Image: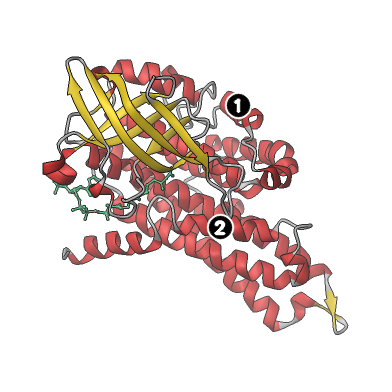
Amino acid sequence: MSPADSKAFDYLTDEHHMIQQAARDFAQNEIAPIAEEFDHSGEFPMETIKKMGEMGFMGIEVPEEYGGAGMDTLAYVLALEEICKADASHGTIMSVNNSLYCYGILRFGTEEQKQKFVTPIATGEKIGAYSLTEPMSGSDAGTMQSLAERDGDEYVLNGRKSWVTSGPVADYIVVFMMTDPEKLHRGVTAFLVDANTPGFSRGKKEPKLGIRASATSEIGFDNCRIPAENRLGKEGEGFKIAMAVLDAGRIGVATQGLGIAEAAYEASLGYVREREAFGKKIGQFQGISFKLADMKTRIEAARGLIHRAAIAKIKSKETGQRYTLEASMAKLYASEMSMFVTHQAVQIHGGMGYSKELPLERYFRDAKITEIYEGTSEIQRLVISRLETGLR
Ligand code: CAA
């Protein structure tokens, strides 16, 4: 039974089903046929990303006045799941633009910042990125070394950031730097940087295991001067902004894991009904059918956690309450589920699962990153257990 048919999902509105269907049609007609080619070449899929912008997929939760679709987080996860089912690279680019980039500016930015920096990203004219990590600070994000110094009505930025999704192509980037290193994480400030600013540079594109069409690179700042009005929030608020934005981002990564796993599961279901061995369909062997039962159950458990986190985020708009716990649990479970499901799917397909002639090995490679970026599984366990025990 398709989850959409289940009464358990009666909180989804007609509008939710409409965007889900639009994303499904676009993903299957325009993205699925090119996914293998772009995985192979590692080229950034600019043409389809622009089309996704025109369809409203780059700013699903962005109000219409800033060029977005003006919908909610459930609409976002439903659409993203469909895109990731066709290709996780497109999904990653969409997820960064929506949650890591637009969300932070909408929540913490000024009216001028929203107009200037959100509108062109939400409409797909330009690409956004989020840059927290540095070569020497990943999980321990508060120990960054990049420095932003105030000089009159400008800030002068210096340093190197790494693992920036869409770094090689981004037009605007939310960047976190130290303005007062003695204050440690309380000395971090967020900035909006236009990639055309002198002193900004891009490093080499990272050669990656998966999500190969989503470009990733280092970025550099060498006396890069930006206007003080491009500061996002107050000085010293940057770390909290980074963490609050990651709460939203982690729901997106969880959804990527779900979309990839569903693609692997559906391919497996088709295969076990057709493939024969020892005079039977292989789905008739318990060794295979029990794998499918475990895959399906974990997929639906992940969907439940993701929808719960999305609803918590929707409610947080009114209550102001954090949804950190829900987001971290969804990301932890869905990313590990995605690794499990894609691993089983390769195994069920045997030699064909290992072959590049089928997309199973791509799903397996693409799933791995969901356990790493936007906070590793270990960091999610740390966040969840600290919130539960109140201990550190
Ligand atoms: N929302 C708001 N505030 C938060 C918060 C949240 N979710 N989490 C923490 N804070 C606040 C705390 O309340 C605390 O506030 P005070 O200063 O008032 O005390 C402050 O932030 C510091 O919190 P912690 O003491 O918990 O900080 P910590 O140094 O122990 O680190 C951590 C916590 C969870 C380990 C955090 O550093 C973390 O999430 N690390 C992983 C970073 C990460 O996910 N990086 C990925 C970057 S993006 C990427 O992958 C690339 C890409 O392009 C996709």
Q: Amino acid at mark 1?
A: Lys
Q: Amino acid at mark 2?
A: Ala
Q: Residue at x 19, y 36 (%)?
A: 237
Front in this rendered view, residue 290 or 93: 93
Mark 2, other Cα within 10 Å: few <14 / some 14–19 / many ≥20: many
Residue 353 visible in the current orientation: yes
State the image coordinates of residue 343 (x, y, percent, origin top left).
61, 68
Left or right of 308? Residue 58 is right
State the image coordinates of residue 238 (x, y, percent, origin top left).
23, 37
- Mark 2 — residue? 367
Left or right of 9? Residue 288 is right
Residue at far front of view: 222
State the image coordinates of residue 166 (x, y, percent, origin top left).
50, 36
Whether 111 is drawn above or below 32: the answer is above
Left or right of 19? Residue 147 is left
State the image coordinates of residue 307 (x, y, percent, origin top left).
44, 51
Q: How far apart, in angstroms, are the residues tagged by discs 2 and 1?
A: 24 Å
Q: Residue at x 69, y 77 (%)?
A: 288
Mark 1, other Cα within 10 Å: few <14 / some 14–19 / many ≥20: some
Residue 6 visible in the current orientation: no
- Mark 1 — residue? 50
Q: Which mark is residue 164?
A: none
Secondary structure at numbered mark 2? helix
Front in this rendered view, residue 297 or 226: 226
Front in this rendered view, residue 3 or 59: 59
Q: Is mark 1 within 8 Å of ligand 1?
A: no
Left or right of 324? Residue 334 is right
N-term mark: 2 or 1:
1
